Amino acid sequence: MNHVSLACAVTLAGVFLAAVWNKRSRLRFEVFVATAGPLSLLPRRWRGRAAAAVTAAESAVVTACAVGAVLAVLGQGGTVLLLGLLGAGALLLIFTVAIGLMLRRGERAPCHCFGTRDTPLGLAHVVRNLFLLALCVLGSLGDSSGFAVPGVVLAVVAGLLAATLVIRLDDLLALFSTTSPRRPTGNLR
C-alpha cells in the first residue's frame, strides 16, 4: 500500500499548495478574509488571524506531505509523511464541519479556497472534503518502505491528476451542470 500512500500524499500536497498559492498576494489574501464563507462563523476581529493561521497550517501540510513523501521514498521512514497526512486530516475535518454549519444555517457564501470563483458552498464541497479526508486515512494506513521506481512515477502522476480534479471541481461541476438555455421573452413573428 506504500504507493497508494504516496499518491494520497501527492494529492493532498497539491490541493493544499493550490490553496496557499491562491492566497499569496496581499490582495488575494484580503479577498479570502473578506469573502471566505466559513470565516463568517467567527467574530470579525478574528477573521484575519484565523485566515493567517489557516494559511500557515496549509503551508505546513504541504511541506510535511512533500518532504515526508520524498523521505519515505528514500527509505528514511514515514513519520514526517504521517504527520502531514494527520495535519491535512485535521484541517479538512475543521473545514468540513464549518461548511456543514454554514449550509445548515442556510448560508452558501463562496469559499475562494482555490481562487476567486464565486461558486456558493454546497453539498459538492462537503463531498470533496470527505473524499480528501478518506485520502488522509488511506494514506496513513500504508507503510513507508519498498518503493519501486515505476510505482513512484505512477503514484505521483495519479496524485497530481487527482489534485487537479479536486482543485477544478467547481469548474467541472459548472461544465457538466444541466442548465437549459434561456428562451427569448419577446414575440418572434
Image: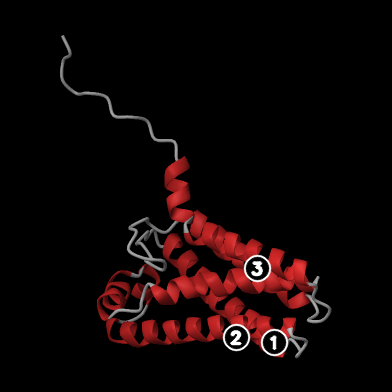
Q: CA distance from mark 3 to mark 1?
A: 14 Å
Q: Quadrant of residue 78?
A: bottom right
Q: Quadrant of residue 52?
A: bottom left
At horizontal 52% and vertical 76% (from top left) the residue drawn is 94
- Amino acid on which disc 1 is placed: Leu
Q: CA distance from mark 3 to mark 2?
A: 16 Å
| For residue 51, above or below residue 4 | below
At horizontal 54% and vertical 78% (from top left) the residue drawn is 91
Between 16 and 154, which is closer to the camera in this rendering?
Answer: 154
Give the labeled residue for mark 3. 156
- The answer to whether marks 2 and 1 mark residues whose Cβ atoms lie closer than 8 Å is no
Give the labeled residue for mark 1. 71
At horizontal 39% and vertical 58% (from top left) the residue drawn is 106
| For residue 24, above or below residue 37 | below
- The answer to whether marks 3 and 1 mark residues whose Cβ atoms lie closer than 8 Å is no
Give whichever of discs 3 and 2 has the lower sequence position: 2
* Res 64 label: 2
